[in-house]
Amino acid sequence: DEDEDEEGLEDGISRPRRKAEGDGEDEGSTDDGGEGEEEEDDGEEGGESGESGEEEEGEDVDDDDRQGQGCPQLLSAADAASLDVTANNGEGEEGLPFAPEPPATARAVEALLGDRPPKTALKLVQRVRTVSSAALGAEKRAKLKAFFAALLEYTLRVMAREDGDLSVKGVAVAYALRTPLVELAVEHPDEAFEFFAPRLLEMGATRLPKAAEFCCLKLITLLFPVSDLQHPICTPASLLADRWASNL
């Protein structure tokens, strides 16, 4: 019975409907013509819907999505090391401050860096470090600590988009800033621990991670020695990653 039902279903889907007995040739030709016109109409409607679908899809794709379609251009370590922060501003860097005050919040860091290219963002961060060197006094050192925490917060924000997806532009900026972030983490280990420890505890309640959580783990692997099995940040992060993997 099941085989008969399946055959009947296939007949209903794939086989054309037979003309009823007694149908004349004129009626058949008229029906065929009507069906042809309907098929043309359906084709036109399908073409219009396809074009509108492409337009809608094009409207949803932004500049960040377009950069992610190919291989993103990341700033190499050699280019980052050769950057001269005291040199004159280059093309597209008009009005770039040479001695910016160290921002103390992530919003202030965002206002300073804005939508600038990764290389320009690196230049601004290095200029902030230059004018806020610890050798200039205890007050400058305190400002540099606050700037480090704000820069970490800003980096995490730009790496993940508001829709929960990964930001190609944000990852490029974070990759360009990896050298000053590592150096600041070495200079201020307590601030680095205080920044990541509560975030790991908060992420521990997450069953499956999203882009923001993955970006946090990626930043941890950039700043801390992952080979240290008793590291106060890397070890909990590794255990958290194992637990997430077991939930997949």
Image: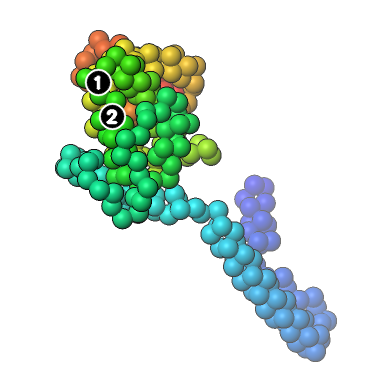
Around disc 1, counting alpha carbons within 10 Å, would you say few (fewer than 14), some (14 to 19), or many (20 or more)?
few
The mark that comes first in sequence, 1 or 2, is 2
Cβ–Cβ under 8 Å for marks 1 and 2: yes
- Tell me what residue is drawn at x 40 percent, y 39 percent: 113
The x and y percentages for residue 137 are 26, 16
The x and y percentages for residue 94 are 36, 51
155, above or below 205, in the image: below
25, above or below 231, in the image: below
77, above or below 152, in the image: below
- Tell me what residue is drawn at x 28 percent, y 35 percent: 127
User: Is residue 114 rendered to the left or right of residue 33?
Assistant: left
Viewer-proximal residue, 147 or 21? 147
Q: Which residue is mark 2?
A: 131
The amino acid sitting under disc 2 is: Val
The x and y percentages for residue 10 are 63, 59
Q: Which residue is mark 1?
A: 136
Helix, strand or loop for disc 1: helix
